[in-house]
């Protein structure tokens, strides 16, 4: 398996990145316009969320044809040009493969609905009466995970939206179809693949009710998932491609198996445990203050555990499904710049491959919508109704959506402070944030102290220092609820990374060996930290990295 430890990956949500033709929707040629910006940033791969033909019930994660480009985003020729020009600039294109399910508009599912047995076996259909679903499993988007088809007298499984029918990976024909999709895109020059919720592809042999949960324990990291991934990777010869699996509700043990080089499954894994530390009672739709001790413990568990097992982490805070991290764990006010830099530095110095989600590199925030009419996301609209049914007032439900909605990350990329933030000549498909005058690419490109400049430095340092890309990791300050700190070591060198999680000064222990260490990077201008009584005082949201001999 190839080594991606020095690489940095940039995620693009095409619909919100750049509109080239004035229809209010971002597109492939819009990405092409911004290749010089991405090259200057220093990233190695551009991951595009799905641009395949789709009814867009779930923003492209409901694929109707894996080999066709949705005209909303452009043409196959546009994508081929993007692949070519990206390669010329030393950046590879990664595509997002949604292989757990297809849209119900997909030809396979339509043939299944028409009674073709062969294609019914491409999905998970169960006989039954209309008043009795096969199990009590719940969809990730709310409601039952089963939908009844009266004309067939059968139910089909949809772990996500009702228009996203789960594929039957037990069927070898399905696996061969999906291998064909990978080969098709390899021939087009695609350099990597992100596999959507790929740890859910293997369902149990027996479907039964879940008496304690929503059903996920029966299909998460299912019985044949490792076998299927090995087969897919081997038969399509993508062992040396960058491949990342999105892992829903997974475990450390499974992620070691998914990403350890000798297993020959995937290059790395996304897991989401660290992004649930503000879920009250584990419920996404119940708010609470972030539990920073839990955050520290989770990072330690996954960083050290993956190192011991020779697994590899995908390092990230943001994506198209997550609220903006600076709104969530940082500050939108006085310490906006400092907190955004601290959160970036915290994960970019860890062991793994960092991902930057569009706009994260300029500190974009949640948009703080005040009306349900401003939301577009299917999950958000579903849960708004559910929250009202549970007895929440409209104001309470909107407050929860303002913190949790996936639309928080999908607002248009803020290129300039002009109308529609330089994203489009037309009214954008989703309302822009109200802070474009403060937060935009154009102003930060001219500012050496900007968040954008800081990200560029982080990327350069990863490529320059084996300590960052290869070093071992050891966590410090384990009992300190205000500071997350760790040490990276490689050969006889060491880096000490200090992150103040709070909007107030915090203190941490000073090792006497650090007195001769040099400052590598920080988000304050002080040359060296304030040290007194063998304690370092960190400024609000301070990020500090020291380097010296171990």
Image: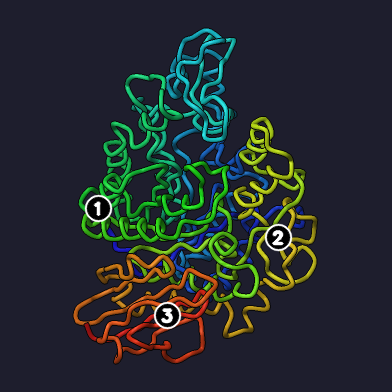
Q: Quadrant of residue 316?
A: bottom left
In the image, residue 535 above or below residue 418: below
Which secondary structure, mark 3? strand
Pick the residue in front: 495 or 23: 495
* Disc 1 target residue: 260
Identity of the residue drawn at 45% across and 80% down: 538
| Mark 2 or mark 3, earlier in chain | 2
In the image, residue 105 above or below residue 70: above
In the picture, measured across the screen, residue 75 lies left or right of residue 174, that is right
| Mark 1 or mark 2, earlier in chain | 2
**Disc 1 + disc 2, Cβ < 8 Å:** no
Q: Would you call the spot at circle 2 few (<14 residues within 10 Å), some (14-19), or many (20 or more)?
A: many
Which secondary structure, mark 1? loop
Task: Please state the horizontal and vertical placement of residue 475, each as a whole percent of the image.
Answer: 30, 67
* Disc 3 target residue: 544
* Disc 2 target residue: 20
Q: CA distance from mark 1 to mark 3?
A: 31 Å
């Amino acid at each position: 398996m190839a080594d991606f430890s020095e690489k940095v990956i940039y995620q693009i949500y095409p619909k919100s990145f750049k509109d080239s033709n004035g229809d209010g929707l971002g597109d492939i040629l819009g990405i092409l316009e911004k290749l010089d910006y991405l090259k200057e940033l220093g990233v190695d791969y551009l991951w595009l969320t799905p641009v395949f033909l789709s009814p867009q019930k779930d923003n492209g994660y409901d694929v109707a044809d894996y080999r066709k480009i949705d005209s909303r985003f452009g043409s196959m020729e546009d994508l081929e040009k993007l692949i070519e020009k990206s390669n010329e600039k030393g950046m590879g294109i990664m595509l997002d493969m949604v292989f757990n399910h297809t849209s119900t508009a997909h030809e396979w599912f339509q043939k299944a609905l028409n009674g073709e047995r062969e294609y019914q076996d491409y999905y998970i259909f169960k006989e039954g009466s209309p008043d009795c679903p096969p199990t009590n499993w719940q969809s990730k988007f709310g409601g039952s995970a089963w939908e009844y088809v009266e004309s067939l007298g059968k139910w089909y499984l949809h772990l996500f939206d009702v228009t996203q029918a789960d594929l039957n990976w037990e069927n070898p024909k399905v696996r061969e179809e999906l291998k064909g999709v990978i080969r098709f895109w390899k021939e087009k020059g695609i350099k990597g693949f992100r596999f959507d919720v790929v740890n859910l592809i293997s369902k149990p042999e027996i479907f039964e009710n879940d008496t304690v949960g929503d059903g996920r324990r029966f299909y998460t990291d299912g019985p044949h998932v490792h076998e299927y991934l090995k087969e897919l990777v081997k038969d399509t010869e993508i062992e040396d491609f960058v491949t990342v699996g999105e892992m829903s509700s997974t475990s450390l043990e499974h992620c070691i198996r998914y990403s350890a080089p000798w297993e020959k499954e995937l290059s790395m894994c996304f897991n989401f445990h660290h992004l649930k530390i503000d879920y009250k009672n584990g419920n996404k739709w119940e708010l609470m203050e972030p539990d920073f001790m839990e955050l520290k413990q989770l990072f330690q568990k996954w960083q050290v555990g993956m190192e011991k097992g020779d697994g590899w982490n995908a390092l990230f805070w943001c994506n198209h499904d997550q609220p903006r991290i600076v709104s969530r764990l940082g500050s939108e006010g006085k310490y906006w710049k400092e907190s955004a830099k601290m959160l970036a530095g915290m994960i970019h110095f860890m062991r793994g491959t960092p991902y930057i989600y569009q706009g994260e590199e300029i500190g974009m925030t949640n948009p703080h919508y005040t009306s349900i009419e401003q939301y577009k996301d299917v999950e958000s609209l579903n849960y708004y109704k559910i929250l009202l049914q549970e007895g929440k007032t409209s104001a309470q439900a909107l407050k929860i959506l303002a913190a949790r909605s996936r639309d928080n990350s999908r607002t248009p990329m803020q290129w300039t402070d002009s109308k529609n933030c330089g994203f489009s000549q037309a009214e954008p498909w989703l309302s822009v944030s109200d802070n474009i005058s403060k937060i935009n690419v154009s102003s930060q490109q001219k500012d050496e102290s900007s968040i954008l400049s800081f990200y560029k430095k982080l990327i350069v340092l990863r490529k320059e220092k084996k300590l960052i890309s290869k070093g071992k990791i050891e966590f410090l300050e384990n009992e300190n609820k205000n500071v997350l700190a760790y040490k990276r070591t490689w050969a006889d060198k060491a880096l000490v990374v200090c992150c103040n999680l709070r909007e107030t000064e915090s203190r941490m222990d000073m090792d006497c060996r650090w007195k001769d260490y040099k400052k590598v990077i920080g988000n304050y201008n002080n040359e060296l930290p304030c040290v007194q009584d063998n304690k370092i005082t960190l400024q609000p949201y301070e990020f500090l990295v020291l380097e010296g001999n171990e």
